[in-house]
Image (cartoon, helix red, strand yellow):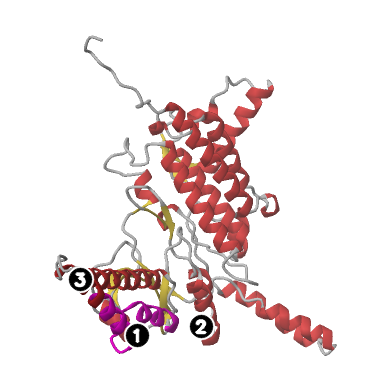
Amino acid sequence: MCRSKMDINAAEPSTTTPRTPRRHSRTAKSSFTNSSSTDPTSVNHTAGSSNKYTSTTSASSKTSLSSFRDALPENPHLYDFTEICSATNNFLAKRFSSSAAWRCTIRGKDVIVFQHKFRRPVEPWQLRQRLATICRGHHVSIIKLRGASISGEHIYLVYDFVNGANLAECLRNPKTPNYTVLSTWLSRMQIATDVAQGLDYIHNYTGLNTNFVHNHIKSSSVIVTEPSFHAKICHFGTAELCGEVPDEEGGQEEEEEEQSGEITEEKQRSSKIKRTTDNRVIKFEGARGYMSPEFQSTGIPTQKSDVFAFGVLLLELLSGEEPLKFKFDKEKGDYRRISVIETAREAVKVETESRSGDGDGDGGRIRRWIDRRLKDSYPMDVAEKMTRMAVECVHVEPDKRPDLRRVAGKISRLYLESQKWSEKLRVPTDFSVSWGPR
């Protein structure tokens, strides 16, 4: 900042320097005495134009510096709880959604405050370190975390407010079930690309030696902006700051004790009992239909469980259906469970068997599975590749799921293929029609 201010001051004309007025006086005197027919006001006009140009340059430099300063990520804020209470009117203001969230203004910023409960105890120094790492992240597909505040067993996370609607509302509106704003293939591919790149940044580029996990991937956590239909991921950092991800310090302490050779049977028993009691006491939350099998059994989120949730979101984006729903069966007189994962696997299986000649199907099963509101206006080869990749992401075994970096790269290539397909179908406008005689 000191260097930029010196540059601005150097660009402005200085009246205290003796060389500048002498140079201007000589120029004015010579121009005025050499030509008697020349209007002396022209000399004043030249000096005024130079001053005007210099002032314009300094003003533009100040504007560019201010815009650059606003674009830089700010330091994380540890808000005082009274500041949160004052902004939300003691939490009596209207909630932003069905969850514990309030839209308000804090320190001149339009933000949303989310209330969460600690799942595991987090030390103050750990909270500051994690908050500094998370707030340092900056990606166009991730909603910025401004800071946090602690009160008792709850933590309040302050995020930037982004104007738009979540993906679930864009795909399924109860008032208009046959209509969606995402009626084009490119709009859905744009959302898939943005979410994949944002998750790739969280997993591989946020922390230097830390494997960050989102653990809240679902259609209601993705905000779609207008008019370009770009997607932004919300709730980044919630898993680490709320203690949803277990610490690795216990394993490190055990390794140090084994190296020193002072570990005893009592210490081994106590550590095992502590772990079993922790696993019994700690409760975990997850979105219905997005939880991987290993997360349901252990309650520990991993990057592979994020890949599973992202695969469900892709299937939801392609089919337009909910991840999990129940439909009443009139023949059996009971509700039938319908999973988008099972229907996608069945469609891919039938399509593969029909192509190999082993099945009785006539093909086109994936086309019938994809959302009908797209009106079959999409490249079939790209849609099939997207469906098969989403099915790979929701594999039962975590080791057989692809890495998110590879998934993001493949989706980006498929998005470029979709753009080429769209340009080929675009109506040509570089011709003219004339009804007049030649």
Q: Nearer the viewer, residue 65 or 354?
A: 65
Location of the N terminus (image quadrant): bottom left
Which image quarter: residue 89? bottom left
Position of residue 23 in the picture relative to residue 360 (left or right): left
Asked whether 15 falls inside the magenta stretch, the response is: yes
Q: Which residues are magenta?
A: 2-28
Q: Is residue 257 visible?
A: yes
Say which of 2 and 302 sits in front.
Answer: 2
Q: Residue at x 39, y 50 (%)?
A: 167
Which of 206 and 234 lies nearest the eye of the viewer?
A: 206
Which residue is denoted by mark 2 in the rendering?
128
Q: Earlier in the sequence, mark 3 or mark 2?
A: 3
Q: Residue furthest top?
A: 437
Instruction: Identify the amino acid type marked 2.
Output: Arg
Question: Which residue is denoted by mark 1 in the rendering?
Answer: 19
At label 1, the amino acid type is Arg
Please report contact status of discs 1 and 3: CB closer than 8 Å, yes or no. no
Amino acid type of the residue tagged 3 in the rendering: Val
Residue hosting label 3: 43
Label 1 – label 3 distance at C-alpha = 19 Å
SS of the residue at dot 2? helix
Q: Position of residue 137 (x, y in %)?
A: 50, 69
> Does 413 appear above or below 95?
above
Point out the tag, 2 or 1, that comes first from the N-terminus.
Answer: 1
* Main secondary structure along the magenta-highlighted residues: helix
Residue 149 appears in the rendering: no
Secondary-structure class at tag 3:
helix
Q: Nearer the viewer, mark 2 or mark 1?
A: 1
| Residue 397 coordinates in the image, percent (x, y) | 68, 51
Q: Residues within 10 Å of mark 3 (few under 14, many from 20)?
A: some
- What label does residue 79 carry, if any? none
| 1 or 3: tag closer to the N-terminus | 1
